[in-house]
Amino acid sequence: MGGPSGTFITVEESHRLLAYEDLATGGSFIVFNNSRSIFQIVKNFTDFFAHESCGFCTPCRVGTSLLQKQLDKIVLGHGSAGDVVELERIAGLLRQYSHCGLGQTAANPVLTTLERYPELYQQQLKKISYEPGFDLDAALQVARQMAGRNDAAAHLQQVEE
Amino acid sequence: MANLTIDGQVVGFEPGQTIMEAATAAGIYIPHLCHKPGYTPHGSCKLCSVKVNGRVCSACTFPAADGQQVISQSAELQQDRRHITQLLFVEGNHFCPSCEKTGQCQLQAVAYELKMHDNHFPQFYPQRALDASHPDIVLDHNRCIFCNLCVRASREKDGKNVFGISGRGIHKHLIVNSESGLLKDTQLTVDDAAAHVCPTGAILIRNTAYHVPIGQRLFDHQPISEVSLEHDHGQ
Amino acid sequence: MANKLRIATTSLAGCFGCHMSFLDIDERIAVLADVVEFDRSPLTDIEHCGPCDIGLIEGGVCNSENVHVLREFRRNCKVLVAVGACALNGGLPAMRNAVSLEDCLLEAYRDGIGVENPQIPNDPELPLLLDKVRPIHEVVKVDYFLPGCPPSAEVFWGFLSALIEGRQPDLPYDQLHFD
């Protein structure tokens, strides 16, 4: 409801009112059927805000890009125990401290889906205490290529066996 | 005289003052980086975020009003200010041990004040340039936090308009207003306010780096909360 | 003896300056030796880390071996501590992040002044470099951070004393430094 910075609602909430007091919208609403991936929608909107941030204030300039990174980590299956908490932390900074409405609502796609589908996010997390936020093996690619190596020691597992 | 309260302390203010100005006059420190007395308020770093009657506002731009209840030192605000400082640290390339400004740097001093021990968030390690073209002044973009103080100083104090801000989002950057984009082709001189106003080590005066040894520098033994009030009171 | 805390230490992409600073606790090392025992550390020459209470990591992560060592420490240490600027944000070694790894290697091994028999080292014994130097908390979970280049002997002493006595460690203003 209300475009990318609005509120995600589920079918169970269809009794709610399109009104300033309940679901505020300037007129825009988008309906997604069950063939759509919620993560893809959230990622699309989050990428949009990282691109749209004007960069004036610290929370939005850095926060929208960090939120993008952190969401990607979870969506791509590299999230672990503390990563949703971290996502909420970044979202909270954006919402509370951004200078204007763009930053204050940029985390809404994350926050309003997290509120309604917490299990979706939790299912996406690995049952380990930590996983790096960058691709370890890809980080060796340049060195591997320049040394002409491809032996076992020239690779890294993303997570310890 | 009208009054507001900051963390329960009654503070008087003159009409037209911001919350930051009222606080400073009363000897209360509110963390800040883009604010400097005598300069047009900017309100972009967000370190001076306070709660005014329950709402988050920037103390450096928000007008003081009679009866306002301002909260500044809550555990929540201090923690979030620490996170905002960490955002600034991961966004740029801030390697204190190799920076001439260490010990005199306001970004670093604010981090100390907020008991920031680590950068917490993942580093961006952006690719940024170093402009060493000017005979007296070095501009290291790696350490710029976009506080706009040099932009304001050059326009408002020096009447020169040497600096500007360009780009948006995480790609925002400081630019130099000359055909070549280099400092050497501007009117910037070593006695300009803009050459001295940088709170970090982004704009440095050459040949002055180690006049004061590390260990004896401004913030080495005195927190910025004290230094700032002493300096800002004098203005 | 059985109740002694076990401590392991190592330097990844660091200069051992943090270890030197640790040794600046001087004769207090004798006091420490009454209550702790050192496992893997440059001070003991033990090659692999066994189960430990505290692991102190100096330096950032610049190559594949650093990743293996760091994981060995995380696996074995109840409490893992990032020590010094390089472990915290990559530090001085991370200043190479401004240059692409390809350019770094070409300059060092092929195009640089005075390079003879130019070739990129390719012995399988050698660890490969990561494209960027990273802080250790981007690779494993870290429990405490001791900033400084290096953290002073007082920082080490205060921190270890607190952990040994079961207190929450704290850094007073005079000990909180990034330089």
Image (tube, rainbow, N blue to C red):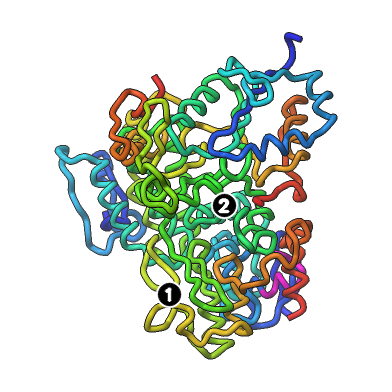
Q: Amino acid at mark 2?
A: Asp
> Badge 1 local density, few (<14 within 10 Å), some, or many (20+)?
some
Residue A33 placement (x, y as % from top left): 15, 42
- Kindly indicate the quadrant of the structure image that contains residue C45: top right
Cβ atoms under marks 2 and 1 closer than 8 Å: no
Residue A82 placement (x, y as % from top left): 46, 34
Instruction: Give A86 or B211, whichever is nearer the viewer.
Output: B211
Chain ID of residue with mark 1: B
Chain ID of residue with mark 2: B
Res B8 seen here: no
Q: Which residue is mark 1?
A: B175
Q: Amino acid at mark 1?
A: Ile
Q: Residue at x 54, y 77 (%)?
A: B150
Residue C84 placement (x, y as % from top left): 63, 42
Side of B141 relative to A42 (left or right): right
Q: Residue at x 64, y 26 (%)?
A: C42
Q: Which residue is mark 2?
A: B80
Label of residue B77 in the image: none
Q: Quadrant of the N terminus of chain C?
A: top right
